[in-house]
Image: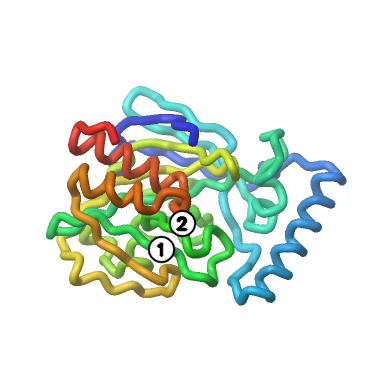
Amino acid sequence: MDILLEGEWKPGSIVATFEPGIKRPTTPSVEQQIARDWAAAELEAVQHDRLLFPGPLVRVLHYERRSHALCFRLGPTDYREYIGTKSLEDAEFRADPLTACAAVRTADGKIVVGRRGHRNMENAGWWHLIGGYVDPTHDRAGDGIDVFGTILREIEEEVGFPRHEVSAVCLGLVRWRPTHKPELIFFVQSPRTSAEIRPADDEHEEIRPIHDHPDAIQEFLEQASGRIAGPGVACLVRYAAWRHSTDL
């Protein structure tokens, strides 16, 4: 796991411009690999009853810290391009879609984690935090992208907490080496308790609230070791350092 940036960014302090005309560079061999890998993914989806569609995503073109702001330039890509380029070492040709996950804290002092259902194409059966891909359709805001809107949308869908009730702060940007995928990590506070979790979708086969205490977080990470997504680990570790001043 690569830690690209750490900080504390609140709504309004992340600027993400979207440039739909900047396409991903490619070559015939790269396009052939995309076609092969997508065909294999389609076959896997049929054989294992998994969900797969080439939906629109956003590609990270550039990011930088400017004073108190975090700035992104984003271009268009889609899930098909991601599947076909995630193994490439040359970043010029990769889709590198931007994603987000959050340590969601409930009013009764729990952090929400989820085990992904078997119909997920990525990390089925693995633990992760609440999150998903930045969507250029759902998360569009004028000429840019609202990445806070992304994480609030995902929380509403996966946990059932209305987006207007929660508050969010971005704690950093990480990249999981196996897929090169950049992911924003957030802390989100909800006024609702863990007993009020009402998922609106079936992305997770299990939702588990764990105590918001360094010992409980460390115990969960040890139990889930080898079956938890890297960005989820990074988010929990960063959250513990930020909130509890504890290195896990």
Judged from this view, the residue extending furthest toward the right is: 28
Q: How many labels, in total?
A: 2
Q: Earlier in the sequence, mark 2 or mark 1?
A: 1
Left/right of residue 126 with respect to residue 240 in the rendered view: right
Q: Nearer the viewer, residue 19 or 50?
A: 50
**Which residue is at the front of the view, 107 or 40?**
40
The quadrant in which residue 110 appears is bottom left
Task: Tell me the tag on residue 132.
Answer: 2
The amino acid sitting under disc 2 is: Gly
Residue at the far left: name it: 108
Where residue 32 appears, as percent x and y from the top left, is: 84, 52
x and y percentages locating residue 120 in the rendered image: 54, 66
Rendered view: 241 above or below 192: above
Q: Position of residue 104 (x, y in %)?
A: 27, 54
Horizontal side of residue 190 vs 123, given as left or right? left
Q: Secondary structure at mark 2?
A: strand
Q: Quadrant of residue 201?
A: bottom left
Are there few (<14), some (14-19), or many (20+) residues within 10 Å of tag 2? some
Closer to viewer: mark 2 or mark 1: 1
For label 1, the SS is strand
* Label 2, label 1: how far apart the Cα atoms are: 14 Å
Instruction: Tell me what residue is drawn at x 53 percent, y 55 percent.
Output: 136
Q: Nearer the viewer, residue 215 or 89?
A: 215
Q: Amino acid at mark 1?
A: Arg
- For the C terminus, the image quarter is top left
- Residue depicted at 64% across the width and 55% down the height: 78
Q: Is residue 35 above or below residue 14?
A: below
Say which mark, if any, is on residue 115.
Answer: 1
Residue 176 visible (yes or no): yes
* Residue sitting at x 41%, y 68%: 204
